[in-house]
Amino acid sequence: MNKFIIPLFIAGVFAISAKSQSYPVSEIPENLLKNSNAVVRLDETKVTIEDRRTQKVETTFVITILNEQGKRYARMFEGYDPNTKIKELDALILDEEGEKIEHIKEKDFEDVSAVSGGTLYGDSRVKYANYTATSYPYTIVFTSEVIDHNTGFISTWYALSHNYVGVEKSVYTITAPADLGLRTKEFNLDAYDVTKEKSGTNITYSVSNILALKPEVMSPPDDMLYPKVMFGLSKFHLEGYDGDASSWMAFGTWMYNELLKETFDLPEETKQKMTALVADKPSTYEKAKAIYEYVQQNTRYISVQVGIGGWRPMKASEVDELGYGDCKALTNYTKNLLDAVGVTSYYSVIYGESDYPKSLEEDFVSIQGNHIILDIPIDGKDVWIDCTSQDDPFNYIGSFTDNRTALAITPEGGEMKRTTSYKNEVNKQIITANCTIDADGWLDGTVTLEDMGVVYDRFRISLMDSDEKEEYYKRYWKNLNNLTIDSIAFENDKTSVKFTEKITIDAPSIISYTGDIGLLIPNFFNNRLSTPERYRNRTTPFYIVRGFADEDTYTIELPENVTIDFIPDPVHKSNEFGNYEMRIEANGKTLVYHRKMSLNAGTYDKEKYNDFRNFIRSASKTDNAKVVLKKVN
Amino acid sequence: MLAVLGKSYAQKYKFGHVSKEELQEVSYPTDADAEAAILYNYRDSYIFTTTSTIELTTEVYKKIKIYNKEGFDWATQTVYLYKSGSSKEQISKIKAVTYNLDGTKINETKLDKDQIFKKEFSYRLDEVTFTLPNVKEGSVIEIEYKITSPFYRSFDDLNFQYEIPVKKFYAEIRTPKVYTYTRTLRGNTFVNLTTERKMDHRTGVNVDVYRYSQENIPALKDEPFVDNLDNYRGSIMFELSQVELDTRYVRYSQSWGDVAKEIGNDDDYAEDLDKARFVDDITDPLISGVSDPLQKMKNIFNYVKANYTWNGFEGKYFYNGLKKTIKEKKGNAADINLLLVAMLRYADIDANPVVICTKDEVRPLFPTLKGLNYVIAYAVINDQEYVMDATREFSEINVLPLDDYYYDGMYINNNSMRWNKISLRSPDPSLTAVNLMATLADDGSIEGKVRYAYDQHSAMIFRTNFKGSNLDDYTRDRENELSGIEISDFKVTNEKSSDKKALESFSFFSEDLVEDIGGKLYFNPLLFLTTGSSPFVSDTREYPMDFKYPFERKYNFSLNIPDGYKVEYIPQSNKMPLPDGLGEVYYLFKTNAMGIQIVYDFKLNMRLINPSYYKDIKDFFSKMVEIESEKIILSKA
């Protein structure tokens, strides 16, 4: 299991002149109400970098909640910790006409730990206001001021941050002493009428009237569609340390020297133990693999985040003693163990995100990422490992960190690299089955599934209890009514990263008789496609994250008491999205069912969505193609 | 005799006694799937009284074996400490050690004090958490701590069954003789109990000692369709029922009548509610000129629902109190439903509170004050009984939120001095009626119109899901749910709360429901309403199945077949009952002059079904899937 390092960061926020204003709902432009559950009336952020060690963030966030679904966007909170102080916190609740209903003062905000369930302990806290609406619509005027003694993170301007929310006006102003080297990076602004003003050390972005968006299936992640601007300082400060982000090289040097170096204190005894452990290993690859397996057997993931500990790993000696740590600690520990046996490796910063490969912004130097993995360059190739995983094979990272940029921290500085990609036919699943059907229509079968690429992640089935495994397969093949799982066996080949599942099953009434006519759907084991939703007017492109290639071959012995009346014609469809093939051969009483399907990773124009949908729809229909049998006596 | 027995009870553990055999064990002997096991779960609780304080002390010891990586979570311990005002529970003497086998040597690693973390979890709870160092596959860990608590009236439930097996369990509870506690055992696991009355030398008073013990307690298994898993967990509950002071007895809840009376005597009920004199302004306009009491009740119920917002908190006692609730127009379950009672009473309706236990709580097994967490309104008009819960927008009179149907309710009528139990375990059945008319074309396409009519809880669920939906999105979701049919003219009637049925209707078109195989048309009789797959796949069942409410689903289809085609095959009509009147399904397949008529009528008559019926239920669903997979075949005439 992989875990995140960094506690959720809550952007600083605060308030300027909005308090005295009233916000009648009638003033919301008509077009902003369409598809909206809430409308942001004003989102004003003012960031003042006072010096390298201080930033003030003032926020005014005014939002009209139109209905119950809009409640979740009523943001009324600020995070804080020992280095981040809340100076002002206030919320006004206004009715439809803009008249005050309630005033929530700072002392009425709830104060709770902001540490999520995955972390044993952390020092970040949050103050939030609770308001139970008695009618809709209503408007919240939230204002805050936060002084942050870290300048390593500067709030990103999200002109739009949610679906179903219209935005009347969003303004972001930042000012910083010129010598700190303020930089910006803009994303997806072209589609919106964004104004950018620069005067002296002041930069202001503003935008008005953004219509509410509705989510669409298979659309690229919001992060890749929404307008936003990132900010960063070349000279910053983090939890007591001055940092340098003028280049990845400089940033990496800073991290190496200030955050990592002093944690390299592996005890001599452990170094010798490691030397002994790899003594008989013939190659660097084998040595590194042995060390990784040692770490997997002797440590586990536990997260504690306090102060600079949110950024600096625990000392190697401490992990050695406690046998646990977070991703920083475990990665750094592994690096130290590898160093002890003369294998070079680099602590690497990355985003852990399974839904899509979220990259660090390569051309924007700043503190990014939420996870740490290890890069081991061996013979000119990078081997990547996730030290928080207790089960992943060596040189396999799966969908959590694949195919994206990572910042490797070397003694010479930071270096942008790219992790292993699992794409298209690499993600292969081969299913073969030998089945017999008896005179009563009872199916007996032996199925073998071979999983490669990210499909290898299916090895997690082997970690389930025996009851859970059985239930898993019954639900996985829910197209087989009243299925019994007779045996389950696995083969986990960690060297070639291939997981093999051998299952024997039986199921009654596989032939559905209507009088003398029997129908048989021979696609027993890969019949899971569902047609994606239909859009009358699709507005976003669609996105196939990794792609895959499936190959199925089932041999089916039919009973003596039937004859084959009809066999569906072969189907072969191929297009830019992928390929689908199905054919059924009959040889006396033996049917051989062949199926191949692949999808190609990529982002496709919205205009092609209907073609794609039709492709899946017809594949799904073909998956249910029926062989017609006739009963003979 | 007692002395001899007393000796044999010596179950006290010795910290640090971990054997090589324990470290070498690779799996639990009777449960190979167990990721970890509790080798010894020991607890010693005693009440210590001085002239000014009463304190409950609990000493805890656990020895846990970790078999594999999935078991590592058991090495992290979290203790919640309750607090209320200046009274709070305290933890002390935390000691924890990990043992690993290194060759033949046993290695010990102690928990560092600086690895123990305490934080405020909520305004009621502090959280103390720590994790053992150096935990590996095969480790054995020992944990010991002591909790002192001023909350002696009810103990935390004494759980002795966990998601992993327990090899040995021993608990000793010592209470002063003058305190009588109700003790209840929950779950299917038997535990041994011995009791003894003796002089406690430390405190110099007579005490009752309860000793519970058991060995090899199996792991608690989870299952789908369970109301609340904690109902089936092996545990012992202690609640104070009586205190003997000199010659006087102070009795706490000993019967449900006592519980109801005790709640009734609380100021929230006896003062605020029973003496409420300020609801006239809001009630008068609702009842002026109305003579029918039923209509008055409807007006008041709808008014409270529409104008007072539930803050999401349950509660049998006020969060705001009636006056503040009226002013702020929001409150917890007690604020809203007791306001409703007060208004009904003002309208001369015989109305009283009923205190209940919702599904969030463990189902009570004995009269308990603590186990009741919620209150609803109850009224009688012309000998007809009505229950009401105005916290949820789509609840109706006699249609309560589903979590309210769980256990009996306690009727609290202080004025006529009546405190008794009423049944609330299941609502009346809800009906979903579907009418469908469709025409098949010879190209295999099908188009038609459907109308759904939902009543009672079906209506409540439909309205809740539909509320606030964007019509386009909702239509698309329906298309997806219903085999990808294309929907047009989507319309909903009575989507607002109402005692009328909620209606949903639309036209549909599909090219995917009918298959042309060798020139014949094949289709499932129930089209896009086919059951598909059975929700029950396990071979066995331990706990009752919770279907949330009894229901009936009735479909009436009328299908026109294309010109030039005839019905070559149509499945047999079929009626299939569940045993003991639990339910039944009826299929009618009939050819008539126009084409085909299909009726499907599925009734499930019980909310909660005993696990002894599991096989019947499982076979029943499977058989439905099988019947519905039989095709209708049309061929050219």
Image (cartoon, rainbow, N blue to C red):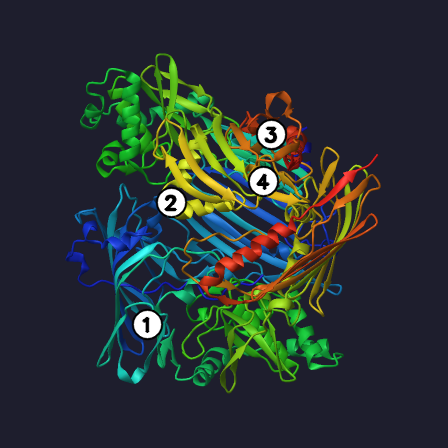
* Chain for disc number 1: A
B72, B120: nearer the viewer: B72
Mark 1 burial class by Cα count in 10 Å: few <14, some 14-19, many 20+: many
**In the depicted structure, whether residue B175 falls above or below residue A307:** above
**In the depicted structure, whether residue A606 falls above or below residue B390:** below
Q: Which residue is mark 2?
A: B469
Residue B239 in the image, given as x and y percentages of width and height = 48, 31
Is residue A115 visible in the rendered image? The answer is: yes
Question: First in sequence: mark 3 or mark 2?
Answer: 3
Q: Which residue is mark 3?
A: B196
Q: Which residue is mark 1?
A: A149
Question: First in sequence: mark 4 or mark 2?
Answer: 4
Q: Which residue is mark 4?
A: B224
Q: Nearer the viewer, mark 3 or mark 1?
A: 1
Find residue A75 and report its image quarter.
bottom left
Q: Nearer the viewer, mark 3 or mark 4?
A: 4
* Chain for disc number 4: B
Mark 4 burial class by Cα count in 10 Å: few <14, some 14-19, many 20+: few
Separation of marks 3 and 1 at Cα, in angstroms: 63 Å
Q: Nearer the viewer, mark 3 or mark 2?
A: 2
